[in-house]
Image (spheres, rainbow, N blue to C red):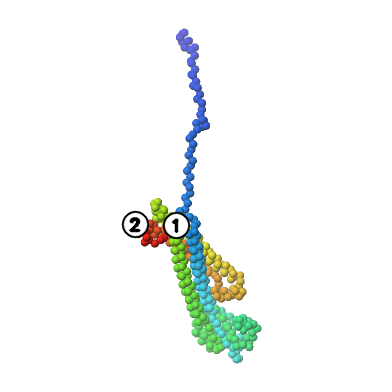
Amino acid sequence: MNDMSRLKNRKTPKPRRTPRQPTTTASDNPQPPRRAEMRVRPTAPILPSSNIQGNALMVVIAIMAFLACLTLGAVSMVRATASSWQSQISREITIQIKPDDGLDMAAALRKARDVALTFVGTKDGTIMDDSATARLLEPWLGTGLNLEDLPVPRLVIITIDESNPPDFDSMRDLLKTEVPQAFLDDHRTWVDRLVSMARTTVLIGTGVLILVFTAMILTVIFATRGALSGNRHIVEVLHFVGAESAFVAKEFQKHFLKISIKGSAAGGALAAALFAVANLWQSNSRSTPESDQATALFGSFTIGVTGYLGIFATMLVIALLTTLTARLTVMRTIDEIDLVRSDPSRSDGLPSA
């Protein structure tokens, strides 16, 4: 009993507390400084965006593009004007009635018109009155004419179907029978002369256009090669450090493509603006001596959608030509460098880029 009671009354020792360790903060244990992030410097183009050779090439391309587009627009304008003249002349025929003693001119005009309209292929007939006839003669005989005192032929204008013209020989024979003083003019002689003139003009314009394009091609080629010759050292350095030929050619292609696009766009836009301004001036100055003379010589200053598409196509041809010339010149320069490295004695006989 005593032993049991002593065990119950014995106090169990309390566990000893371990001293609290002081907590550490980031300030007490500084981290090593972080390295600054590496920034990749943006790569600069291999060729400078603008230099003397590039600017000179751009000016040359702009001038040649302007001349080529101007010639192309002029040829298109002449062709459209000649076609319009030919269509206007071949759309109408004229019946002339010469005055004669005892001839009732008004009745003869009506009868000639009715006879002509009986043929298949005719659309309408118009009798030119005295005032219209006087206006036709005004540049030569002046104003205030009395047609009754002058032996002036009177006219009947017949509109025909161009796709299905009437039988002119039969019409001419019937008119001679019904109205002996009538003479049918189908303008065939004038149409043939106009067609011949139009074809000759278009051929001359096409020849001039070919010459301009040839000069433009040669000028662009030599100007491009001249600009590349000033950058030959860049090609050599890139080739020596191991750059592939295709990579070097691609970089030069992009550089000269930008130059050619800027130059050809400037020349083509200037030519298109010139035609647009001329057309606007002609539209706003009708019935003036200057406009009438310009219209008589050149027709309408309108090149149409085809002309503007031709100008755009010319710009693309110039850009592609310049780019192709740059690529071929760079590839040839690299071949020359390899040839000189393999046999330095042959460097004197190589042409310069």
Q: Is residue 7 above or below residue 45?
A: above
Q: Is residue 335 visible?
A: no
The disc label shown at residue 346, or none? none
Quarter of the image with the C terminus in it: bottom left
In percent of width and height, residue 241 lies at 40, 51
Residue type beneath disc 2: Asp
Q: Which circle, 1 or 2, is nearer the viewer? A: 2
Q: Earlier in the sequence, mark 1 or mark 2?
A: 1
- Residue 104 image position (x, y, % from top left): 61, 88
Residue 227 at x, y = what percent? Answer: 46, 60
Of residues 30 and 228, the one nearer the viewer is 228
Which residue is nearer to you in this view: 253 or 185? 253
Q: Element at badge 2? A: loop
Mark 2 lies on residue: 343
Residue 344, above or below 110:
above
User: In the picture, residue 234 is in which quadrant?
Assistant: bottom left
Residue at the disc numbered 1: 231
Q: Amino acid at mark 1?
A: Asn
Q: Could you tell me how far apart the alpha carbons at marks 1 and 2 are, in whole angstroms?
A: 23 Å
Instruction: State the residue at coordinates (47%, 62%).
Output: 319
| Local crowd size for mark 2, using a 10 Å CA cut-off: few (<14), some (14–19), many (≥20) | few
Residue at 52% over, 78% down: 90
Q: Is residue 17 visible?
A: yes
